[in-house]
Amino acid sequence: MADKAMTERLKTIRDREAADFAARRPRSAALSRRARSVMPDGVPMAWMAGLHRHAPLFVAGGQGSTLEDADGNSYVDFNLADLSNTAGFGPNAVTQAVAARAARGMQFLLPGEDAILVATELAARTRIPFWQFTISASSANTEVIRIAHALTGRRKIVMFDGKYHGHIDTAMTTGGAPGDNEPAVMQGLGLLPAAGADAVNVPFNDLSRLEAALEAGDVALVIAEPALTNCSLVLPEPGFLAGVCRLARDHGALACFDEAHTWQLAYGGFVRAENLSPDFVTLGKGLGSGTPLGAYGMSAAVSAFVEEHHEVADSPVRGLAIGGTTFASALSMAAARAMLEGVATEEGYRRIARLGNRLADGIDAIIRKHGLQWCAFRYGPRSGFCQTPQHPKTYAEAHHSMDIAFSDALRLYMANRGVWESIYSAGPQVSFAHSDADIDRYLDVAGSFIAELHA
């Protein structure tokens, strides 16, 4: 996309499609103007204003794999609310369970049987035996970090470049690795520099750099996404994930795999697929299928420590700083149980993997047809356009495989033709509600876009 003529062609398509996008959505525009009088940027959550380079849609509802905006336009959804809703819209096992649970009480600050059933199923899928529940993957990662600090008596947290572990201070950093000679730098306004003092970020797929970060013996936790999913897709090299566990253990640190995204890619996540035995695994997003929910599993040894140090009311000795009033609500447990038992089944994952391969094969066919030196990202239900000949192995390589101008023009082009594309840093993903016809629709529209771009 560095070619000047191609850049101009992208701009021409983008400008034309942006005008069409605005013309077809007058009610969304009117709602946006109204919303700006009571909400910054006219949105109830800041990300909604910055995820796309166009005004956000106002949504009316959805059915199956399709969502509908306030103007009555419908879209086959391949973003899936950034993987937080993989069950689809309208009546399904999750929405029916949530409705039934809500009618009987949504929250009690007391346990119910659903929590046992969800924890049992998660333990069976991941082989991680003990579980706790929160309101998001961010809060699950926060609690894992606190437990690791308390259990090891150490301060530092090692992460990998290109990661996303939620909007928590320690994780919103870059740098800080041995040899950098400076503490990690905060990534965002409002974050205090002190939060980066204990953060260390090393390249993904680089066990030698990880080992160097562990050698001082001051690391409490190594936390990694099994595959980087917020810079399109970077898969682990053979042996890398097992090496993370081994090196952490050898240096007295704990290991955690954050599967908030990757749980949607394979049954039981990468922990099951790679036969891994970390100290923790964290989940979120799609597990609740739109219901706010996070979870973390832990080893038996960690569970024993948590039991020994739980918070006791009126005790002069404070316990672990974990828990929250709305964590593990009856509503979220009902949603998770229905998701696991009725939607995200082993057969369901086989089906979306087949559709994902079909999507990736179709993208590869489009690329070959136009003689592009690109390839398709692919893993299970996840795919997308990789604008380099080889799949990236690090965040730095992934950065070169994406083009925001391309993504912006593609998104508008597809939206105007009834397909809701993924956000810039991700890629289209198949949901449990998608069909073969939906895949064909995506490929047909994407193929037309590439044909016009490379005419």
Image: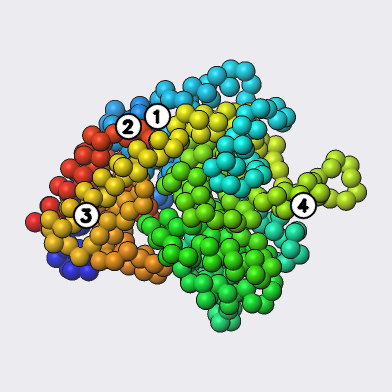
The secondary structure type at the circle numbered 2 is strand
Mark 1 Cα shell of 10 Å, populated few (<14), some (14-19), many (≥20): many
Q: Is residue 192 above or below residue 130?
A: below
Q: Position of residue 344 (x, y in %)?
A: 45, 36
- Say what amino acid the circle numbered 3 marks: Asp
158 vs 109, left or right, is left
Q: Are the two marked residues, 3 and 4, in contact with CB atoms closer than 8 angstroms?
A: no
Q: Considering only order in the chain, which callout, 4 or 2, is on the residue closer to the N terminus?
A: 2
Residue at image mark 3: 364
Q: Residue furthest right?
A: 316
Q: Considering only order in the chain, which callout, 4 or 3, is on the residue closer to the N terminus?
A: 4
Residue at image mark 4: 305
Q: Residue at x 55, y 31 (%)?
A: 337
Q: Give the Cα separation between the discs numbered 2 and 1.
A: 7 Å
Residue at image mark 1: 89
Q: Give the Cα separation between the discs numbered 3 and 4.
A: 49 Å
